[in-house]
């Protein structure tokens, strides 16, 4: 077990966004979380990544209770994330962005007078990640000048540069053309293997991607887990197809 | 390359100024160098961390009053001792102030720093017996590296030894700050400026880094304040008044906060322009100055350094790297 949530409930005033969600992610798994808008996906991610403290229930990362611990400490404990709306450092270059992640991972952020440019360990590790994500030839480009697909990749790449054990990807292919989606997913999965990532949690609307990559799918509906099963079982589950995936369009 | 040549030329001009320029203009260089130190620190917070302080006159005041107290009350005349004490006191005061201020951002941060600045201003104004109130305290001529230099006339002292002392302090402050902004720590500050939420997900503790940046900037402002007070010879509460905090933000905007040397250029232009406008229009110079600030913000948000860069980019066949110098 790497990540476990038990009986997570979250209220916004009267509104119950999560109503007793429990899930367990094991090493070696690629798990997708699906659900219609308003099902509680965003709230669940924010609880799992420590941004939100649940109203009830607990979250464990390995053996440690990390409920509401906050993103900074969770990042140090090996849980990284990327965002649905791409998050970059507009004025920093690709290399600087990745260097920042490596500096953070190595705990070198308080080196006030050391030269970053001469820190081979940090620069090499950053370049290695840039290479994995196909961003090496753009490493001096300011992030804001990257095309949208590369911004998405950089957001994810900086999370990978933390060498996390588990990563939570919030719609990594949203806003990207269909042709690029598969390319991005291939890069993510192979990079994950290279850095020894133990588990990936994917939140995704594109069912082609969900079914192509997942070992397991968790379907959320109205703040509860509607189904937690293999892709084949999910596809056969009429309730999930009805509530989450939607009826297949007539041919 | 052009940037480096420009820096060398500017440095040479500053070194040569006491031999080439009029005494009047050389004396104007003293506040320029003191503000240069202040602004190097302020810009760590402003340009590199993304926090605009309207209260840094507080720390200028601490530095200047440290010099006044040590020289006139305690009989300590060594400028080295004054600078070190000012830096220490600046850090001691900044530590709790920063801890409260960095929990807020944008206008809330600005207003809170302003409030602390006003508290300090009122303190030095009202505690007459300690601070001399609005009359202030004398800042006696400090000794430099153990040399009393009592035999020199005030002008010779200020345009000679004191001038070069200030220049060395500014140069050391610049080298140290250059290292800070090009360190792993400096990179973390830039991530916080650009996107604090993203920085947090990378494990960068935003509050802690903002606190460091604030305290370092306060130390710089205090050292600058210690240098600023001596040539005036008297330290009064206007040094700590909030308009003074505004002036240094203006200098930063004028020169360009996105560049390392921008604020120093801003201080230089500010001081000579203020002097020029004061002699040109003694009653309405503030009006012209204000219009100028508005023009800079609207027409050249990158400040003078932004204009220099744009001009260089236009002239350069390779339109990238100069901006990163």
Image (spheres, coloured by chain):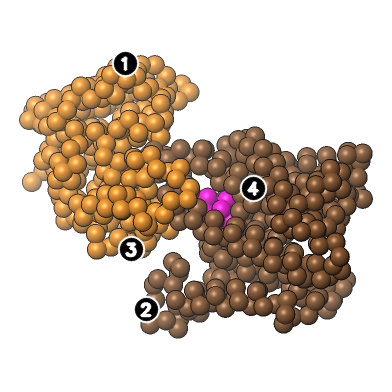
Q: Which residues are magenta?
A: B43-49
In reply to whether residue B222 is colored magenta, the answer given is no
Residue on which the image places disc 2: B318
Q: CA distance from mark 4 to mark 2?
A: 39 Å
Please tell me whether mark 4 sits on a helix, a strand or a loop. Answer: helix
Residue B36 horizontal/vertical position (percent): 65, 62
Chain under callout 1? A
Circle 3 crowding by C-alpha within 10 Å: few under 14, some 14–19, many from 20: some
Q: CA distance from mark 1 to mark 3?
A: 46 Å
Chain drawn orange, letter?
A
Q: What label does residue A7 carry, if any?
A: 1
Residue on which the image places disc 3: A140
What residue is at 69 percent from the left and 63 percent from the top? B165
- Left or right of B237, for residue A203: left
- Foreground: B74 or A103? B74
Q: CA distance from mark 3 to mark 4?
A: 33 Å
Work out whether A147 lies above or below A26: below
Residue A244 horizontal/vertical position (percent): 21, 32
Please tell me whether mark 2 sits on a helix, a strand or a loop. Answer: loop
The quadrant holding residue B96 is top right
Find chain B in the image and tell me its colour.
brown
What residue is at 64 percent from the left and 63 percent from the top? B168
Q: In the rendered structure, which disc, 4 or 2, sits on the residue that comes first in sequence?
A: 4
Q: CA distance from mark 3 to mark 2?
A: 14 Å
Residue on which the image places disc 4: B219
User: Marks 2 and 3: in contact by CB < 8 Å?
Assistant: no
To the question of a shared chain for discs 1 and 2, the answer is no
Circle 2 crowding by C-alpha within 10 Å: few under 14, some 14–19, many from 20: few
């Amino acid at each position: 077990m790497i990540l476990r949530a038990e009986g997570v409930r979250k209220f916004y005033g009267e509104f119950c966004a999560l109503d007793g969600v429990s899930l367990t992610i094991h090493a070696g798994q690629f798990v997708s979380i699906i659900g219609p808008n308003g099902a509680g996906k965003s709230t669940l991610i924010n609880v799992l990544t420590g941004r939100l403290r649940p109203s009830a229930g607990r979250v464990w990362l390995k053996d440690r209770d990390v409920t509401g611990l906050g993103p900074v400490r969770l990042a140090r404990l090996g849980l990284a994330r990327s965002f649905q709306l791409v998050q970059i450092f507009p004025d920093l270059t690709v290399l600087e962005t990745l260097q920042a992640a490596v500096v953070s991972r190595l705990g070198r952020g308080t080196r006030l007078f050391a030269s970053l440019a001469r820190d081979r360990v940090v620069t090499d590790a950053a370049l290695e990640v840039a290479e994995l994500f196909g961003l090496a030839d753009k490493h001096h480009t300011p992030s804001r000048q990257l095309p949208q697909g590369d911004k998405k990749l950089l957001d994810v790449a900086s999370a990978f540069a933390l060498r996390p054990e588990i990563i939570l990807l919030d719609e990594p292919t949203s806003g990207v053309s269909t042709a690029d989606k598969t390319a991005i997913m291939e890069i993510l999965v192979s990079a994950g293997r290279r850095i020894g990532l133990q588990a990936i949690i994917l939140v995704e609307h594109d069912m082609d991607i969900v079914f192509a990559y997942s070992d397991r799918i968790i379907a959320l509906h109205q703040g509860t887990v509607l189904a937690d099963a293999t892709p084949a079982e999910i596809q056969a589950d009429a309730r999930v197809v009805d509530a989450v995936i939607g009826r297949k369009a007539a041919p | 390359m052009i940037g480096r040549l420009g820096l060398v030329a500017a440095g040479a001009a500053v070194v040569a100024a006491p031999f080439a320029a009029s005494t009047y203009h050389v004396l104007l260089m003293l506040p320029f160098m003191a503000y240069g130190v202040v602004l190097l620190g302020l810009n760590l917070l402003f340009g590199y961390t993304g926090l605009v302080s309207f209260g840094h006159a507080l720390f200028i005041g601490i530095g200047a009053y440290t010099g006044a107290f040590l020289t006139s009350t305690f009989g300590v005349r060594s400028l080295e001792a004054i600078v070190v004490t000012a830096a220490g006191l600046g850090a001691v005061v900044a530590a709790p102030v920063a801890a409260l201020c960095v929990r807020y951002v944008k206008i809330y941060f600005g207003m809170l720093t302003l409030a602390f600045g006003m508290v300090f201003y009122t303190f030095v104004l009202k505690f007459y017996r300690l601070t001399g109130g609005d009359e202030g305290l004398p800042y006696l001529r400090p000794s430099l590296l153990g040399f009393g230099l009592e035999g020199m006339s005030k002008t010779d002292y200020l345009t000679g030894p004191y001038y070069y002392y200030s220049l060395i302090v500014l140069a050391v402050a610049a080298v140290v700050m250059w290292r800070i902004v090009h360190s792993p720590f400096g990179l973390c500050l830039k991530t916080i400026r650009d996107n604090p939420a993203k920085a947090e997900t990378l494990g960068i503790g935003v509050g802690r880094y903002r606190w460091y940046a604030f305290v370092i900037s306060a130390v710089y402002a205090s050292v600058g304040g210690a240098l600023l007070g001596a040539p005036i010879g008297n330290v009064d509460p206007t040094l700590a008044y909030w308009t003074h905090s505004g002036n240094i933000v203006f200098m930063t905007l004028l020169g360009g906060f996105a560049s390392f040397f921008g604020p120093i250029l801003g201080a230089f232009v500010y001081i000579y322009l203020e002097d020029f406008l004061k002699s040109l229009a003694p009653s309405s110079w503030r009006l012209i100055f204000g219009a100028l600030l508005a023009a800079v913000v609207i027409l050249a948000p990158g400040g003078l350094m932004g204009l220099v860069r744009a001009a260089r980019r236009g002239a350069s066949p390779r339109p990238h790297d100069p901006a990163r110098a």
